[in-house]
Image: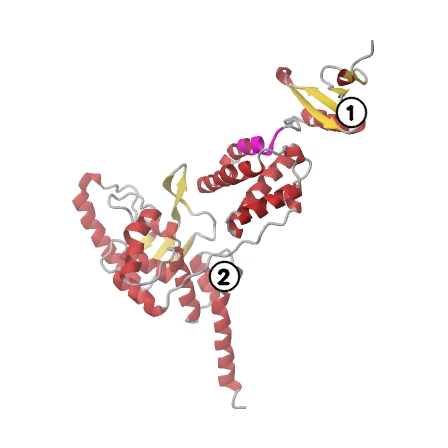
Amino acid sequence: MSTPASTRRTGKRGNNEGSITQLSDGRWQARVTLEGSKRKAYYGATRAEAAAKLHTALRERDRGLPIVGERQTVGQYLDTWIETVKPQIRASSHRRYSDYVRIHLIPGLGKVALAKLTPQQVQLFYSRKLAEGLSPSTVHHLHGVLHRALEDAVRMGLTPRNISDMVRAPRRTRTEMVTLQEGQVKQFLTAAEGDRFEALYWLALTTGMREGELLGLRWQDVDLERGTCSVRMNVQEAGGRFVIADVKTSYSRRNITLSRVVVEALHRQRVRQYEERLAMGERWNAALDLVFPNGYGGIMIPDNLAKRSFKRALAKAELPDMRFHDLRHTAATLLLSRGVHPKVVSEMLGHADIAITLRVYAHVTATMQQAAADVMDGMFGML
């Protein structure tokens, strides 16, 4: 009696060498046994194709890499990957990655076999997301997360290439930068007069410090006699809560010279805080030594700052809605437009180099070039 095609074998192998079988539909199946008697299968149109896949699987096993069958889906891989990448990135980044993976990538691509994912499938996925109303920036971020995940899959030998390299992601759109004019800055600061965070707004609008840096500023980092402050710490989210941590980069660590009006505002802040500490007694958290804490001396949550103070001050000043980060843009724009050297502004902002400053604030430097041309006209225009 002949052997059925579904079980026909082509040569014997040892228990750890795998097996190759021709199926009833004409395809060839290669199988390899792993620890715990688990088996993984690979398929090919010819025996040679199945044998090549088996050879690759055995080689990766011998190198100590995990062996994954062709049936592992993109969803199964991403569900595991999002947990393994957690120690490598910031908590806030991991939360965003998780949202991209579980809200968009897994529902959209999760059923496709990881080894069979094609550039066309990914490109179509991006098009559908744009049609659903996602912004080009969001789809651009989805591409970034998928690319990193597939890059790790290639590195671990789970897929031969990163097919997202062959896909065109939509360009990231820039958030519209909002800046206040000098008169509007005065309106805002007048509206914030007497607010618990009045001095914080003075600092933001004269130094361009980031929100996290302002909320993480400690009294030990401020020298009111010399009129300087040192940016060393910031407030950041970690594990679902906010903590005080070192600033991210070496160039973010910087010393800033303060204007006299800011020093005076900080003196008022110190007096105000002393009165609050007396009122709170033992309930005040003195350990953090924050210049701009919440009502108990603890970390002021950025969202709470926006709702309880910043947005109210904007409304009181009758100014358009804007992000807190736009105070940083306002400071940089005002400094550059008043002729402060871009290198100085770059150092105050904590940029990695002056090129970043010039690129972000190109609209200001264009005006500065006109001013330079006017200077040359003044010097040589009468010749």
Q: Which residue of the protein is positioned furthest toward the bottom in this rendering?
A: 383
Q: Is residue 141 left or right of residue 38?
A: left
Residue occupied by mark 2: 360
Q: Disc 1 designates what residue? A: 26
Above or below: residue 194 compared with residue 167: below
- Magenta-colored span: 72-79
Residue 121 location (% of width, % of height): 63, 41
Answer whether residue 226 is visible to the viewer in this image. Answer: no
Q: Secondary structure at mark 2?
A: helix
Which of the 4 image quarters holds residue 9?
top right
Mark whose residue sits in front, 1 or 2: 1
Dot 1 alpha-carbon crowd within 10 angstroms: few under 14, some 14 to 19, many 20 or more: some
Residue at the limit of the structure toward the left, as seen here: 279
Residue at the (50%, 49%) spot, across then down = 133
- The amino acid type of the residue labelled 1 equals Gly
Mark linked to residue 100? none
Q: Quadrant of the N terminus?
A: top right
Residue 155 located left or right of residue 84: right
Earlier residue among tags 1 and 2: 1
Q: Is residue 77 visible?
A: yes
Q: Is residue 178 above or below residue 132?
A: below
Q: CA distance from mark 1 to mark 2?
A: 60 Å
